[in-house]
Image (cartoon, rainbow, N blue to C red):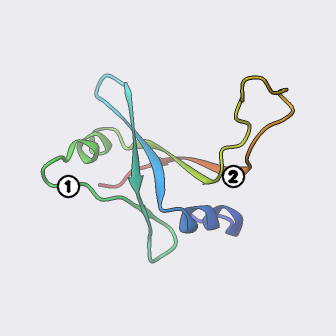
Amino acid sequence: MILPNEMASIVTEEERSLLSTLTKSGVPITMALDHLWGDDNRTIDYGTGLSYPAKAERARANPHVGILFHEGETEGIYVPGREPSQREGQGSMLAIAADASV
């Protein structure tokens, strides 16, 4: 996958992302994980421990995964007692639907 520079900077600058895989019954499981931007600038790599290979097994069974990257502070947080127009923080989000290769 080739990402525009603007999007690729989010992937390369952030250390952690949310990876969602699906169970056999279709229930999403989302985990915060460290990722690596592949040397070829075309892959986003994750690791899994030998003692807990469940996420790799889920991705092998159903390669459709979701990945969410977030840069900066959360945008649009609701703070009780403030007007909705007075939002705190700013940042960028990048959501990717992809097929995993295990």
Q: Looking at the picture, tell me which residue is in the foreground, 99 or 69.
A: 69
Mark nearer the N terminus (2 vs 1): 1
Say which quadrant the N terminus sits in: bottom right
Q: Disc 2 marks which amino acid?
A: Ser
Q: Residues within 10 Å of mark 1 (few under 14, many from 20)?
A: few
Position in image of residue 43 (x %, y %) = 46, 65
Which residue is tagged 2? 92
Mark 1: amino acid: Gly
Label 2's element? strand
Residue 81 position in % (x across, y down) = 77, 23
Question: Left or right: 85 with respect to 3?
Answer: right
Secondary structure beneath disc 1? loop
Q: Residue at x 29, y 59 (%)?
A: 47
State which quarter of the image contains the C terminus: bottom left
The residue shown at (71%, 65%) is 6
Position of residue 53 in the picture relative to residue 75 (left or right) = left
Find the residue positioned furthest to the bottom: 39
Q: Residue furthest left?
A: 51
Which quarter of the picture shows residue 44?
A: bottom left
At 23% from the left edge and 43% from the top edge, which residue is drawn? Answer: 57
Q: Is residue 29 above or below residue 40?
A: above
Query: What residue lies at 84% left-to-right and 35% top-to-bottom?
Result: 86
Which residue is denoted by mark 1 in the rendering? 49
Q: How many numbered marks have been drawn onto this rendered protein structure? A: 2
- Residue 20 appears left or right of 95: left
